[in-house]
Amino acid sequence: MRKKSWGEYPKSLLDLIIEKWRYSKIKKYIKRDSIVLDLGCGYDAKLLKSFQNIIKKGIGIDLNFNQKLKSEKIKLIRGRADQKINLPLNSVNTIISLALIEHVENPDMMLSESFRILKKGGNLLLTTPSKYSKPLLEFLAFNLGIISKEEISDHKRYYNKKSLLTALLKAGFRKNKIKTRYFQLGLNIFARAIK
């Protein structure tokens, strides 16, 4: 079972480029004065920190985080995204989950908890590598060593748009409130599900 958060070990230049590309997919959905939960926020909670000037409150959940991070607007919680989340029903406007669902043991729990804590009209913004990316990611990690071997070896599953849609429907989201699309030449999937 995974013990470290994203960013607790060195990242390659390509890892950083891919991370920035994922961030660009969700930036336009972050509303001013909203409450944002970042599932798998990473050791340094970089995404929440980048939004702290526009959001009302940011909450990050991950296995570990940098104890030196100080912000009145950001609360970091040590925990797993695929277990019961200690937040009230209908309590957040936006949940971000970037490149996380492929790592968790119980993706159904992660998605149903996300549905539970989202406010009505709230967004779940999710990215995950597509099943088409698996051979390329493994080649880049294990043969060339230019992306994190730890991250790729921790992948438990890969999705396509249909399997991701099925998982979101099972969690309670309605089909007409879910949009999925491939990006990065079909190697990743972006999903936006509205409660």
Image (spheres, helix red, strand yellow):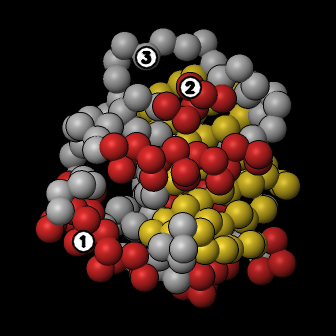
Say which of marks 2 and 3 sits in front: 2
Q: Circle 1 sits in a helix, a strand or a loop, which is it?
A: helix
In the rendered image, the quadrant that contains the C terminus is bottom right
Q: CA distance from mark 3 to mark 1?
A: 33 Å
**Amino acid type of the residue tagged 3 in the rendering:** Leu
Above or below for 177 versus 75: below
Q: Circle 3 sits in a helix, a strand or a loop, which is it?
A: loop
Residue 106 can be seen in this image: yes
Total number of numbered labels? 3
Sequence-wise, the earlier of marks 1 and 2 is 2
The numbered mark at residue 49 is: 2
**Amino acid type of the residue tagged 1 in the rendering:** Glu
The numbered mark at residue 167 is: none
**Amino acid type of the residue tagged 2 in the rendering:** Lys
Q: CA distance from mark 1 to mark 2?
A: 31 Å
User: To which residue does mark 3 refer?
Assistant: 69
Left of 157 or right of it: where is 57? right
Q: Quadrant of residue 6?
A: top left
**Residue shown at 32% from the left, 37% from the top:** 7
Residue 25, position as x, y percentages in the image: 65, 53
Residue 107, position as x, y percentages in the image: 45, 68
Sequence-wise, the earlier of marks 3 and 1 is 3
Category of crowding for the residue at label 3, using alpha-carbon neighbours closer than 10 angstroms: few (below 14), some (14–19), many (at least 20): few
Nearest the viewer among 130 and 166 is: 130
Q: Say if mark 2 contacts mark 3, CB within 8 Å.
A: yes
User: To which residue does mark 1 refer?
Assistant: 138
